[in-house]
Image (cartoon, coloured by chain):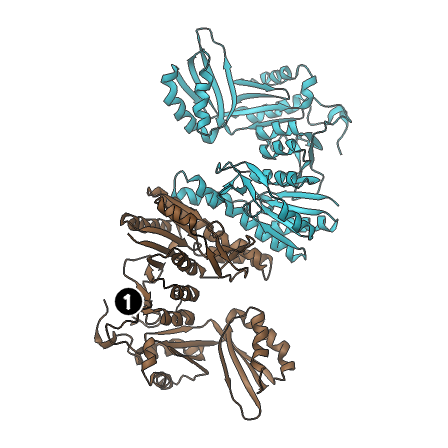
Chain colours: A brown, B cyan
Amino acid sequence: MALLVQKYGGTSVGSVERIEAVADRVLKHKQQGDDIVVAVSAMSGETNRLIELAKSIQETPDSREMDVLLSTGEQVTIALLSMALMKRGLSAVSYTGSQIRIKTDSAHGKARIEEIDTTRMRADLDAGRVVVVAGFQGADEQGNITTLGRGGSDTTGVALAAALTADECQIYTDVDGVYTTDPRVVDTARRLDKITFEEMLEMASLGSKVLQIRSVEFAGKYQVPLRVLSSFKDGEGTLITTEENDTMEQPAVSGIAFTRDEAKLTLKGVPDIPGVASKILGPISDANIEVDMIVQNVSADGTTDFTFTVHRNDHDKALGILKSIEKELGARDTLTDARIAKVSIVGVGMRSHAGVASTMFKALAEDAINIQLISTSEIKVSVIIDEKYMELAVRALHSAFKLNVSASGVSEV
Amino acid sequence: MALLVQKYGGTSVGSVERIEAVADRVLKHKQQGDDIVVAVSAMSGETNRLIELAKSIQETPDSREMDVLLSTGEQVTIALLSMALMKRGLSAVSYTGSQIRIKTDSAHGKARIEEIDTTRMRADLDAGRVVVVAGFQGADEQGNITTLGRGGSDTTGVALAAALTADECQIYTDVDGVYTTDPRVVDTARRLDKITFEEMLEMASLGSKVLQIRSVEFAGKYQVPLRVLSSFKDGEGTLITTEENDTMEQPAVSGIAFTRDEAKLTLKGVPDIPGVASKILGPISDANIEVDMIVQNVSADGTTDFTFTVHRNDHDKALGILKSIEKELGARDTLTDARIAKVSIVGVGMRSHAGVASTMFKALAEDAINIQLISTSEIKVSVIIDEKYMELAVRALHSAFKLNVSASGVSEV
């Protein structure tokens, strides 16, 4: 008998029929003797509907009230799913983030979970109930409703699994696992049976969109085995674990991630002196804008160009901030480009393989794709290119790293 | 500077435009120096949409989960209204029933308010904030979300006004006050400037639909001055107070109420012995079915017919109960009729005027309307008739009691 936390995303609960299908799946697991806690998202489309409503009233909706508004989405789902479970003769009970005491900080719209009180859930599980929890939301110390930001339902699932020391956190989504890259871009993309947290972190943060990055961080930190599965078809999905797969030779690159969600900002000709970087990024961070890549190269004339990327939604805000500090910094100009894409190769095997980066750059050069920025970590290499070459680059790299066939020619089961 | 609690119903917040109009009205009152607490309903149509969703999953939705579901309706409204207020430069904060600690009992779907913690609201009002509270909902001792039943937002408004000892509770709705009867039925129906709680109670419970009965009970009990106003046009509305209007001669009848919401059930030929009534109504009450009229007449052969009315929605349930106890009671048969209407004349002046009932019966007889049941209280006389005669009866009575002109020929201002 296992304790499973299952998380179902927006498309998995997108209609009454889908909710019924989720209830069927939960029933199957209950019949196998598992204890189940379910975390759910808002029905697909609902969050966008609510955002539209808010924006039709306030251009930049108040963040506290936005959380009050958006949290209703999951609240609808937990009630409907609980009803569907009861209809199947199961005992079920729903909880909002506030009710189950998912305590978060007060950063509305991007709150972080601080603590989860498991008393009530444990009592429910002991009584044989399925516990249905609203994902994506919590409440701060003062009882204000908070949300974890979009995709935050994954984080809820993992946090619940960690708090309950569940045997597995299963993330049901509209894909049947983690692929070497997006199959919509490369039709020979292959599902991975296993992937490490580190790799998944790079894949997720780089836009693989399967899992929300913070949920993977969380899962890695608390060693929660995480499994990505399809809620539309049966299958084993992809297991995300701490164990590196050593039963077969580790391929150098596990997958290709990419995203169009970023924008690039460059301050031209800032003085090449200590403290400049923090003078630039301080105000950006104060405005709660997350920065992804940061690139600075030395320059000959005592000035340098400082480039960083942010989420495209934050482009205008970031540009406004740079414009306001440009003069004070002594910069020559601010240039921005939102028509960019980031493409990355990811793999723990990279650590022990030389020449991975050069294989990447060679493959891009062969298709005449110009590289605008480069950033590396131990297990990934990312480049920024013109967005119109994105698909081409992904296909070229997928093929260059032979991702369409299994490592050592062994088919994965 | 007055402390006002304003309640806006579903049609008053039925669209973004309507919410903006409510915000304009609140702004006007704030500019006049009033402190404002607003209680709101779900946007019109939303509650029905949610009920449909639930019923498409569970024929009789679980009542706890139904409350979790329905309470999202008002939660959407409080967020949107708060945003609209902020857009106008006002400081505003929203609270769900749970957050503001509207403590209720655990009767899901028809919970009663037990206590309201005003600490947080007082602090907000002192800080100049408009407090926006979700109507219709609360939470029980264990933090389970409860709803007060449909129309319960009025009750929330009055309960807030009572807890805060507000100067007035203003109920904004789609009518501009309480009328002598429904103007859609009688075009000469006249708005009343004032009405007593007692009269309003009879009018509301009898189907005038302007105010929910429990809100009036509440207001009367805590002496909260209650005003019904239109959220669509300016005007003084109707003030509901404890003071009987003695500046002009009190008319015998203040208004004509009517409803089609009831069904009639009769147990034929039950033994006319002590304890029978409680044997019939005990199981009905245990099933949480509210009974309205109860009529029993002595019978000659040692048996009697026992008749009562319930809400039409409860007809099938009540019939099932009667059928199951029919034999044990020794009744001959159970007859029911859902095609009935109740028409009532209401007025505190009735107490000192003889002949009011006979005027009523005479007026109905002149139009050949047969009376099936009669029930009276100190300030009203109700009759049950065939529903097809309802409008005819209302018009006949409105005219018979000269309600289209003011008492003593004095026009009301």
Closest to the observer, A178 or B294: A178
Q: Residue furthest bottom?
A: A300
Give the quadrant of the N terminus of chain B: top right
List x then y, in percent, for residue A289: 54, 70
Vertical arrangement, residue A138 with respect to residue A185, above or below = above
When the figure is inspected, residue B99 is found, relative to residue B392, above or below; the finding is below
Q: Can residue A172 be seen in the rendering of this structure? A: yes
Q: From the top left corner, tell me how far across and down residue B84 is, in percent.
A: 62, 54
For the point 54% across and 50% down, which residue is it? B76
Residue marked by disc 1: A193
Q: Name the image quarter holding residue A334.
A: bottom right
Viewer can see residue B180: no
In percent of the image, x 72 and y 39: which residue is there? B236
Q: Between B147 and A13, which is closer to the camera in this rendering? A: B147
Q: Is residue A225 above or below residue A325?
A: above
Q: Chain of mark 1?
A: A
Label 1 crowd bin: few (<14), some (14–19), many (20+), radius 10 Å: some
Residue nearest the viewer, comparing A111 with B14: A111
Q: Kindly give the residue lying farthest to the top in the view shown.
A: B300
As drawn, is A216 to the left or to the right of A265?
left
**Amino acid on which disc 1 is placed:** Asp
Q: Position of residue B322 (x, y in %)?
A: 40, 22
Q: Position of residue A322 (x, y in %)?
A: 60, 77
